[in-house]
Image (spheres, rainbow, N blue to C red):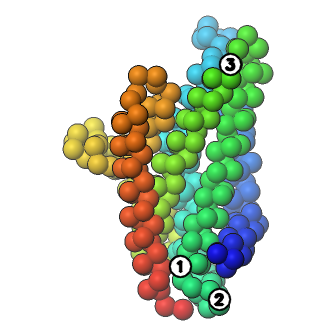
Amino acid sequence: MHAIWLTWQNEWMLMRLRKKTTRFMVLSACLPILFALVYHTLQKSMGVFGLTVSFPVMLLSLYTIFWIPLFIFMTTADLFPGETAARTLKLTLLRPITRFQAFTGKMMAAATAMGFLFVMLFFVSMACTYVESRTVDLSVGDWFGYMKAYLAAFFVMLALFALFAWIAQWFQNPTGYMVFAILLYVAAKALPFFSSVFSAFSLTSYSDWYVLWLSHSTGFTTLMNTFLFIFSWFVLFFSLGYLMFDRKEA
C-alpha cells in the first residue's frame, strides 16, 4: 500500500507539472464564467431569463458530454502512448514496484486530477449562479442535490477513464490515439440514435445518469442497478488495462 501511495505522489506531481494539464485546469475555471457571461448577454439582447438554480446542472451536462471526456483523452494520451513515445514509460516499469502498483498509482493520480476538476467546476458554477442572479435562493437541499449529481457524474467519468486507459495502451503515438479516441467517442454517442439496444449497454449513454439522483421519483432499485452497471464497466476495463500494462516490455 505504501508503494502505491508513493507512486500516486510521483504521478500526481508529474501531472501537475505538465503545462498542458495546468492550462486545461485554468481554462476549466474560466468555462463557467464564460457561459454565465454569454447567458447574461443573451438575457439583455434577447430577453432570456436570468440564471436559475438549474444553471449548475445545465453546465454539468456540457461538462460530461464534451469537456470531461476531452480531459480523459488528453490525460490517457499523456499517461500511456505519450510516455511510450517519449520513452519514459521504461523508467516506470523498472522501478522496484509491481506492475499493479505502478498502474494503480497512475489511475489514482488521474482520478485525483479529475476529482479536482469536478470540485472546481462545481464551486465556480455555483458562484456564477449567485453572482449573476442574486435573487436565486439555494437551500441546503439544493446544495446537497447538486453535490450528489456532480459526484454521480464523477463516478461515470471514472469508468469512462478506465475504458480509454485500456484503449490508449494499444497505441504508440499520442496524436493518433487522440484522433481515434475522439472519433470513437463521437460514434458511441451517435449510435444510440439508431439502436436502442446499443444505448442500453453503452457506457457513454449513461453520462447523464446524475439526473436520476436529482429526481425524487427514482427508486432505490433503479439507482443501484445503474450504479452496479457502471461499476462493472470500471472493474472490467481497469482489469483489462492492468493486464495489458502488465504485459508491456520494460
Q: Quadrant of the N terminus?
A: bottom right
Say few, some or many: other residues with alpha carbon within 10 Å of mark 2 (under 14 / 14 to 19 / 20 or more).
Answer: few
Q: Secondary structure at mark 2?
A: loop
Q: Is the C-beta separation of discs 3 and 1 under 8 Å? A: no
Nearest to the observer: residue 83 or residue 204: 204
At label 2, the amino acid type is: Arg
Q: How many marks?
A: 3
Picture coordinates of residue 204, whole percent (x, y): 39, 47
Q: CA distance from mark 2 to mark 1?
A: 12 Å
Residue that mark 2 sits on: 95
Q: Is residue 232 left or right of residue 19?
A: left
Q: Quadrant of the C terminus?
A: bottom right
Residue that mark 1 sits on: 100
Q: CA distance from mark 3 to mark 1?
A: 44 Å
Q: Earlier in the sequence, mark 3 or mark 1?
A: 1
Residue at figure coordinates x 40%, y 27% from the top left:
218
Picture coordinates of residue 214, whole percent (x, y): 50, 27
Q: Earlier in the sequence, mark 2 or mark 3?
A: 2
Picture coordinates of residue 206, whole percent (x, y): 40, 42
At label 3, the amino acid type is: Ser
Is residue 36 visible to the viewer in this orientation of the structure? no
Picture coordinates of residue 134, whole percent (x, y): 76, 14
Residue at figure coordinates x 59%, y 83% from the top left:
89
Specify the label residue 114 is tagged with. none
Q: Secondary structure at mark 1?
A: helix
Q: Is residue 204 left or right of residue 48?
A: left
Residue at figure coordinates x 25%, y 47% from the top left:
198
Residue that mark 3 sits on: 139
Q: Earlier in the sequence, mark 2 or mark 1?
A: 2
